[in-house]
Image (tube, rainbow, N blue to C red):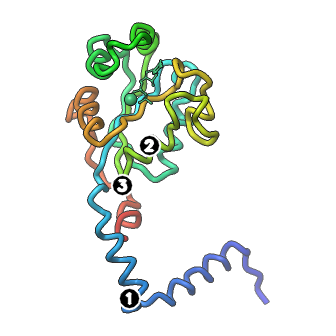
Amino acid sequence: MALFPRCLLRGVSSQIRNLNVMPSSPKFMYESARCSSNTSGVRERTLIAVKPDGVHRRLIGQIIQRFEKRGFQLVGLKMLRVSEELLSQHYSSLCKKAFYPSLLHYMTSGPVVAMVWEGHNVVRSSRMLVGDTNPAEAPSGTIRGDFSIHISRNVIHASDSVDGAQKEIALWFQNSELMEWKCCDHDNLYQF
Ligand code: UDP
Ligand code: MG
């Protein structure tokens, strides 16, 4: 008898299980209805930035990999030195905080890698991937929980709301710097 690798057999058996869910079955109809109402956020976008400490520590690749592995799509990417003017708009709500001058100093201390990522619920999911602002509160497995120990050197920025993300993307990127493209697995990911 021919021997098949175990992983191939597992793949076949899961396909056979899927065949039990026929298009007319109640389970299939429930799944289609539930998921099709969730597709509105597919084009949601967020601003992610690897801060100067993350760039210096050569964490750019590992950070990008976490967003790719999760299934999000990169639509903008650039390396830049951020001006104080841009930062004063980006962090306008924090300008009265005691830590604001040191935040400006930190964010202008070296290059930053700014990105725009797209996908279903990307704003909320990114905040989960990134972890709490204070790395001491960020669980292991999150970017801040794995790569940082102090709130003033927390490696990465992620927009905290859909509205905020739109404003931040418009501040950091020109429209011409954003790529409209469809990833080859897009339909597989989003045709629920
Ligand atoms: N920050 C700081 N000290 C603080 C609070 C914040 O240095 O006590 C810095 C930190 O780099 C943080 C950034 O200010 O990421 C923006 O603060 P925010 O509350 O918006 O946190 P985030 O959205 O980045 O998690
Ligand atoms: Mg914030």
Q: Position of residue 102 (x, y in %)?
A: 45, 9
Q: Amino acid at mark 3?
A: His
Per the image, the residue denoted by label 2 is 126
Residues tagged 2 and 1 counted as in contact (Cβ below 8 A): no
Question: Which comes before the other along the chain, label 2 or label 3?
Answer: 3
Q: Residues within 10 Å of mark 3 (few under 14, many from 20)?
A: many
Residue shown at 49% from the left, 38% from the top: 64
Q: Quadrant of residue 47?
A: top left
Q: Amino acid at mark 1?
A: Pro
**In terms of depth relative to the viewer, which is nearer, 116 or 136?**
136
Q: Position of residue 126 (x, y in %)?
A: 44, 43
Q: Position of residue 53 (x, y in %)?
A: 53, 19
Q: CA distance from mark 2 to mark 3?
A: 11 Å
Q: Is residue 159 above or below residue 4?
A: above
Residue shown at 43% from the left, 17% from the top: 111
Question: Any mark on residue 120, and which?
Answer: 3
Q: Is mark 2 within 8 Å of ligand 1?
A: no
